[in-house]
Amino acid sequence: MPSLLKVLILAIVQGLAELLPVSSSAHVVVAEKLLGLNPSSPEMTLVLVMLHTGTMFSVIVYFWAQWKHAYFTTSHALKRFAVRAFWATLLTGAVGYPIIEVIERTAFKGHTKGEIEMLFSRLDLVAPALLAAGLLILISGLRERSASARSTAGSRPDYERSIVLAGENVTFAQAGWMGAIQGLCLPFRGFSRSGATISVGLLTGASRQRSERFSFALAVILTPAAIAREALRMVKASHASPAGAQHLSLHAGLTAALLGMLFSFLAGLAALRWLSSWLENGRWYWFGIYCLLAGCVVFYLHHLGF
């Protein structure tokens, strides 16, 4: 298991990057490599499970009041949200898991069993995913900023109407597109889930508030499944490891992992405040610029041999 200091560093990186549209997985993979850890090893799974749990709770705490107002005030609102969330999550699975199966069957051809997590440490795969996410965020941010400027300058009533509509849910079509792009994020580390889903929401005409709110509602629905997959990997690795070799010292690492969960929770809350502020002030495209620069840095680190 990694040391407590390394876990805390990973927790802060995970908490900040998980909820900003900059791909937490890419940042955590790079941080792990710089700290001398193996991102694809089962030993890191307990830590990742706890860090994901911490950020999931930060999302729930931060958005609960908004979700309660938008989704749970009436039975009709709850039904509309449930239908859209189910549709989006269904498309996430329909898009993401077949791609994972194809990658596992082709990338590990000739091996007994390969898991896509084994590819997550490859910076040559993370870098292009970061660049793709950066382009998507940049395009959606600049387009939304331009549309907002025209609306504000040309028609005050339209602007006021957008504020009223901000309390409504995304449309069925918008939910579908956000769910489908979320599925594309599952197999590719570096392709930011929050960045892709919010960007697609903006590109399909959803308001900033609705895109952000629904994107993170989808994250809370998806995260338990992701945690369960990681936990299953940990259990399989524990059973497969011979006594004395590659033993997973879960008890020894539990304290560090719990502290990591707390720090990722706190960092997640800070990241959400930052994200909401930039999104509301038309600075969304800056995250795209950051992803493009980060992709270049990751390519350089790969060139150096990390």
Image (cartoon, helix red, strand yellow):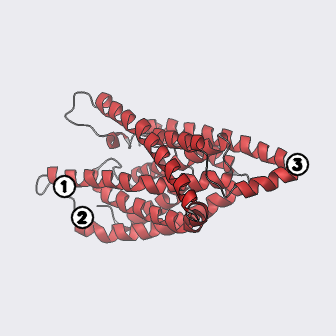
Q: Looking at the picture, which amino acid does disc 1 mark?
A: Ser
Residue tagged 2: 250
Q: Earlier in the sequence, mark 3 or mark 2?
A: 3
Counting from the top left corner in percent of width and height, residue 40 is at: 33, 47
Outermost residue, right side: 154
Residue tagged 3: 153
User: Taking 292 as reference, is 273 above or below it?
Assistant: below
Counting from the top left corner in percent of width and height, residue 278 is at: 68, 56
Is residue 255 visible to the viewer in this orientation of the structure? yes
Quarter of the picture containing the C terminus is top left
**Lateral position of residue 23 relative to residue 250, left or right:** right
**Lateral position of residue 73 relative to residue 187, left or right:** right
Q: CA distance from mark 3 to mark 2?
A: 59 Å
Residue tagged 1: 238
Query: For numbered disc 3, what is the local secondary structure?
Result: helix
Counting from the top left corner in percent of width and height, residue 10 is at: 43, 60
Q: Residue at x 15, y 53 (%)?
A: 239
Alpha-carbon neighbours of circle 1 within 10 Å: few (<14), some, or many (≥20)? some
Q: Looking at the picture, which amino acid does disc 3 mark?
A: Ala
Q: Residue at x 29, y 40 (%)?
A: 115
Q: Earlier in the sequence, mark 3 or mark 1?
A: 3
**Would you say the residues marked 1 and 2 are in contact, meaning their CB atoms lie under 8 Å apart?**
yes
